[in-house]
Each structure stands twice: as structure tokens, then as C-alpha cells.
Amino acid sequence: MSNLSYESTSRPVVKCRCGIPAALKTSMTEANTGIRFLACKFYNPETGMRGCNYFKWVDEPVNETSCLKLEIGVQKRSLERLEKKCDELSLAVARLQENDKKYSGFFKVVFFLFIVLICKLVM
């Protein structure tokens, strides 16, 4: 007996082994995120119920998904490197600002002494 029948809209209705129309679901697993499949309406991964265990991919898992996941991984690593570089630069700026505070007073004193020395030499 076939598990395929037609509704009045001429669209095929896939029935599971229980004889009822299979439910159209979307995979949310890491390996097949966004891929649609048909399953027994009694299938419920949260409760562990499997019904008649009917399962069929509607959208075949394709390499495009793998490519997109790879690209996401590349972008995440790039973002992590940029965030690390940003942290390094922020630390360098903080050190420079701290050094600026330390040495600005020192340079003011040196400049003042230089001016005093020039004035004494000129007089």
C-alpha cells in the first residue's frame, strides 16, 4: 500500500505507517539546521515518543549548509581575533595614557629647568 495520496488541491499528502498525514517539521540539530523533513505526527523528540518511526527528508541535506556553517566558523574566528586585537589596543592606549600622566610632569620639570638654564646663560 502506498503512503502517498492527494488532497483536493492536487498536492501530494504523504502518510506515515500509521495511515495519517505525516507532519512537516524543520530540523534544528546542529548538523541539519533548517532542513525540512516529514515524520509521524506521534514523533516527539522531547518525550521520546516515536510513533511508527516514519521519517523522510523533504529538503535533502546539501553541502550548502556545510559551507554556510564553515563560513560562520571562519567569521566567528575572525571576530574573535578582532576582539582580541581590540583588547590589546585598548590596553596599549591605557598604558600610553598612564605613561603620558607620569612623563608629562617630568617633561614639564625638564622644560622648566631648560628655560631656567637658558635664562642664566643669557644673563
Image (cartoon, rainbow, N blue to C red):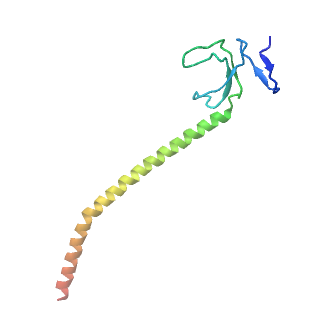
Question: Is 2 situated above or below 58?
Answer: above
**In the shown orientation, is residue 65 left or right of residue 109?**
right
Question: Is 28 situated above or below 17?
Answer: below
Question: Which residue is pictured at 43% across the width and 47% down the height?
Answer: 84
Q: Quadrant of residue 75?
A: top right
Question: Which residue is pictured at 47% across the width and 44% down the height?
Answer: 80
Question: Which residue is pictured at 67% across the width and 36% down the height?
Answer: 64
> Percent from the top left, x then y, of residue 67?
64, 37
> Percent from the top left, x then y, of residue 56?
70, 21
Please identify the residue farthest to the bottom as the structure is shown: 123
**In the shown orientation, is residue 93 left or right of residue 115?**
right
> Percent from the top left, x then y, of residue 5?
80, 18
Question: Which residue is pictured at 21% across the width and 83% down the height?
Answer: 118
> Percent from the top left, x then y, of residue 20?
72, 15
Q: Quadrant of residue 45?
A: top right
**In the shown orientation, is residue 102 left or right of residue 85?**
left
Instruction: Identify the image quadrant of the N terminus.
Output: top right
Question: Is 67 situated above or below 43?
Answer: below
Q: Quadrant of residue 31?
A: top right
How many numbered marks does the figure carry?
0
**In the shown orientation, is residue 36 left or right of residue 103?**
right
Instruction: Identify the image quadrant of the C terminus.
Output: bottom left
115, 3: nearer the viewer: 3
